[in-house]
Amino acid sequence: MKRGVLHPGIMDLAKYPFLAEAGEYLRDKGFNLEQLGHPDWMPLVEKAYGRIITASSGQVYSSDIEKLKDLDKDMEILSFIVAVILLKAAGINTLTRRFSLAEARRSEKYLEHDLGRKYVSDKAVKDSDFPLKIIQELFSVKVVVENDEFMLSVPNYLQRAVHFHEKEWKLVNRRVATGFVHLTAHETVRLIRTELGQYINSRIQSITLTSIPDTFKARVQDLVQLATKFSDAVVISSDYPPCVKHAIEVLEKGENLPHSGRFLLATYLLARGQTTDQIAPLFKNAPDYNERVTRYQLEHISGSSGKGTKYQCPSCDKLRSENLCFAIPDCDGIINPIQFGKKRKI
Amino acid sequence: MLEKDTAIVENAIKEYYFNHFDLVNVPPKHTQREFGYQKINGGMIRHIAIKDNKELHLLLMKEAPSDVYCSNAYYSFPNLPMSEKDWKGADLIFDIDAKDLTLSCRNDHSVFKCGSCHGIMPGKQSACPKCGSTKFDVVSVACKNCISESKKEVKKLVRILGEDLGIKKEETEVYFSGNEGFHIRVINDNYEMLGSQERADLVDYIMFNGAMPETFGIKKQNNSKSTLPEMGEAGWKGRVATSLFGSKTKVPKVTRQIISDGYLAFQVKLDEIRQTMGVKVDPKVTMDIHRIFRLEGSVNSKSGLSKIQCKNLDDFDPFLDACLIGEEEVNIIANCPVLIRLKNKKYGPYANEQISVPKYAAVYMICKGLASVV
């Protein structure tokens, strides 16, 4: 059976249920929304709800796909689809974004695993071709495989790697030859994480829903209720520049702030004299929050761990190029957010 | 610039354009590019769209601009204000300037000009002997060594562009800048969509900025010889290996030394390699995706020389090949304490002397602020 351009099998769809081909597969098998509304399917609705709850708490839903029977693989695909319907009916963007990011991280695991299997056996070769196809079809990024390495063209690499602050992502710290950057499977997948999250989010946004089965409605209400905890009013000091306010607002809403935004927030608040203990709680709403990692990173940025380098707040120029600048007239004349409120145009 | 000096320079430039229209052509995708120009003592006029060579030549004759520029970027609407232009991409450009190469010859051909009384001094002084001002402008004149050292940087750059970044020779155009360096333009579809930040990282690669010891196999502890780069490897790994080892016979000894010296010493080594092997380009130029860059074939008013393409870099002599102003004699008063070589002839030094020299030499000295029309 051929579906779309990717031709995924049932195992692929269980791993990557956000592909357009998943919907076609279920239709081919005779599933429809009306049928799923039957009380017999309640366990599926619960499974889908659980998938959203896991994502909303910053965890990644996982199941041992390799060991599942075909029928259970169908349930994996269906629970994703029903989760999308529940989210769409609840209409809470924050929840949808968290779910998208968590699902991106879930599939990242499979992408990396499948890419890495290229040289295990002939069957594995087929496994690794599929993630390469996904990357090419979804993000127009051609990954060339040579020996046990994955190669991206220099421009494709740069467009993604510049969003990372860690020095090892700088082009100068990569193996570069004849226009290509050499990467491991893990690095290749890490590069596209943000795009994968955005892709899943845009897929969910593009769905139109006319009505939902009655059996779904209680869980939709629960999601609306759950979302209220993300929308508590936040008091932000008026002394902060608009870029920092924006970063705090995004986090407080439980939405994903890109790495560069988190770096801005941490370096700015550290420069203003706040301690890592005061700053760490700000990140607790982030979809991928992990207290230990957050503290480690804050200590690293503050210079109290690692090599002792204290990182400086990025310049306005840098923030502009990262789309993190939300300049207001009061910003006039400053070149770094730290100067906000101190320097005024003469 | 004084009015009489302006007149002679403008006339010389106009005459140059009239005689050399063949050298001044619009670049590829010209209808999507922004053009701009400047007149002597005037401000920059930009956001101009140009249809074809004819329209460009008409502008040159009408305005006799001292400097002409064209964007490296392509836009949907090149003549609208920046925010409405709709950026579509930009050529990758590089600027190599002899003044950034910290060459020892610079002092021998640099003149210091008092910012207050405009008095000329051959060497650096703490204060102007005439008026006591401590502000100086530095004027540098033609130097063969500066050009040959700049050419070495161009060759390093072209090699990295080709071997590491996969940019073909035919996609790389090398130009003499019209003063003391070279401009390199890359026309390659894959690179034209890169934003400023991506170009900044690309420049760091070319300059060898930000390299970590870990990349070249040296960790903070437990180092072994197997992780060090090998000579002949692609990219910076191979170049670093060549610089560290020199020859294959030295590999075992140098490897032992590197491992025993440790992490920090290796970082210092990488910094030395950056200074010798990194290409000294001006990072601001490459990062700028909205720049208007000197147009090929146009005159550079800092010298009166032309920005022209170097088909054969080794044989290229800018003080002959790019010196295209007329030859008739002009009377000037020159205050030029250093020797100048143009078109294989020597001029100077002059100490406030009235002299008669070919127009190209007169224009060169006037543009440098070292002479004035009688």
Image (cartoon, rainbow, N blue to C red):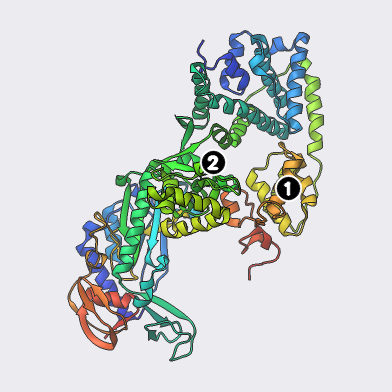
The residue nearer to you, when weighing B70 against B287, is B287
Task: Choose the circle earlier in sequence order: 1 or 2.
Answer: 2
Q: Is residue A166 above or below residue A88?
A: below
- B62 relative to B227 in the view: left or right: left
Residue pictured at 60% horizontal, 22% vertical: A16
**CA separation in Å, label 1 and label 2:** 24 Å
The residue tagged 1 is A248
Q: Secondary structure at mark 1?
A: helix
Q: Secondary structure at mark 2?
A: helix
Residue B322 placement (x, y as % from top left): 25, 64
Q: Residue furthest left?
A: B328
The residue tagged 2 is A160
- B100 relative to A283 in the view: left or right: left
The residue nearer to you, when weighing A193 against B244, is B244
> Label 2 is placed on what type of residue?
Arg
Which label lies toward us, 1 or 2? Answer: 2
> Label 1 is placed on what type of residue?
Ile
Q: Is residue A93 above or below residue B241?
A: above
Residues packed near mark 2 inside 10 Å, few (<14), some (14 to 19) or many (20 plus): some
Where the C terminus of chain A falls, by quadrant?
bottom right
Residue B50 placement (x, y as % from top left): 34, 53
Residue A306 placement (x, y as % from top left): 67, 51
Residue B164 placement (x, y as % from top left): 40, 44
